[in-house]
């Protein structure tokens, strides 16, 4: 028999369910569920920044070549962020070059930390660009390799180290194994002129691209936003416990 003023088991469960729902909504509003790197062609997850001005005399122009098997639409460009803290005041362009003409077909200049951090890279949505079948291109980052914004270089990584991965986007693209390198001081042409081969894996953690649905790109909150959100969640839990 339930006494007057006594709370039933269902009465106790309901506040708990409300608390869980509130926490879920709060976490979602903070953007803590970060997007997956699905959709990026070169995934730089887990790479350290191991090449800077001291290790090679950067900044550099760094490119990775690929061929298009089936026409592919690009709506996202990305740049390796070694420290996960953005690029400060530096302006670092990323461009896709048509290797037949040497001209860029898509580009964006990264700066600061406003763009979402996905798969080890800051990514930015661009107006869709179609890469044509049976053509070759290169994704190039222009300006990494400084002390503040290092790149990753496979030459400096040991055996068993994490390397970038290549996603063919369902067979639409093929990685040729060819890389491109040049110093930023060689301004013309923009396309890096020194080339080499490493078919085992992409030799640079630098630029990337892909197709990502806009709704799946979530901005990364500033640390102060996380702290404020976690503080609010703490107050919710504290308030609920005092109500029991």
Image (cartoon, rainbow, N blue to C red):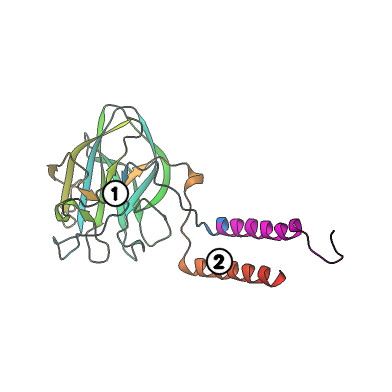
**Residue 18 belongs to the span the image colors magenta:** yes
Q: Residue 100, how many percent across, how many down?
A: 21, 33
Residue 207 disc label: 1
Q: What secondary structure is found at the residue carrying circle 2?
A: helix
Q: Which mark is residue 82?
A: none
Q: Is residue 154 left or right of residue 123?
A: left
The N terminus - image quarter? bottom right
Q: Quadrant of residue 202?
A: top left
In reply to whether residue 116 is colored magenta, the answer given is no
Q: Main secondary structure of the magenta part?
A: helix
In the image, 238 versus 65, the foreground residue is 238
Percent coordinates x, y for residue 139 in the rendering: 27, 44
- Measured as percent of width and height from the top left, residue 57 is found at 14, 62
Mark 1, secondary structure of its residue: strand
- Magenta region, residue range: 4-27
- Residue at 35% across / 34% down in the picture? 169
Question: Split into 4 quadrants, where in the image is the C terminus?
Answer: bottom right
Instruction: Find the distance from the CA under tag 1 to the CA under tag 2.
Output: 32 Å
- Image disc number at residue 229: 2
């Amino acid at each position: 028999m339930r006494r007057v003023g006594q709370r039933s088991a269902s009465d106790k469960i309901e506040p708990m369910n409300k608390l869980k729902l509130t926490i879920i909504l709060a976490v979602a509003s903070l953007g803590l569920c970060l997007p997956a790197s699905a959709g990026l062609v070169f995934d730089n997850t887990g790479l350290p920044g191991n090449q800077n001005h001291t290790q090679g005399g950067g900044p550099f122009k760094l490119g990775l070549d690929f061929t298009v098997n089936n026409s592919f639409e690009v709506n996202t460009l990305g740049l390796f962020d070694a420290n996960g803290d953005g690029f400060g005041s530096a302006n670092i362009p990323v461009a896709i070059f048509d290797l037949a003409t040497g001209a860029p077909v898509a580009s964006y200049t990264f700066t600061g930390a406003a763009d979402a951090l996905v798969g080890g890279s800051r990514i930015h949505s661009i107006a869709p660009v179609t890469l044509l079948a049976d053509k070759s291109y290169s994704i190039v980052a222009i300006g990494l390799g400084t002390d503040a914004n290092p790149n990753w270089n496979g030459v400096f990584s040991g055996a068993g180290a994490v390397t970038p991965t290549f996603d063919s986007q369902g067979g639409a693209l093929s990685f040729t194994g060819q890389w491109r390198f040049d110093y930023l001081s060689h301004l013309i042409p923009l396309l890096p002129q020194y080339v080499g081969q490493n078919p085992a894996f992409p030799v640079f953690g630098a630029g990337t691209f892909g197709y990502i649905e806009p709704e799946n790109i979530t901005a990364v909150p500033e640390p102060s936003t996380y702290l404020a959100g976690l503080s609010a969640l703490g107050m919710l839990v504290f308030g609920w416990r005092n109500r029991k």
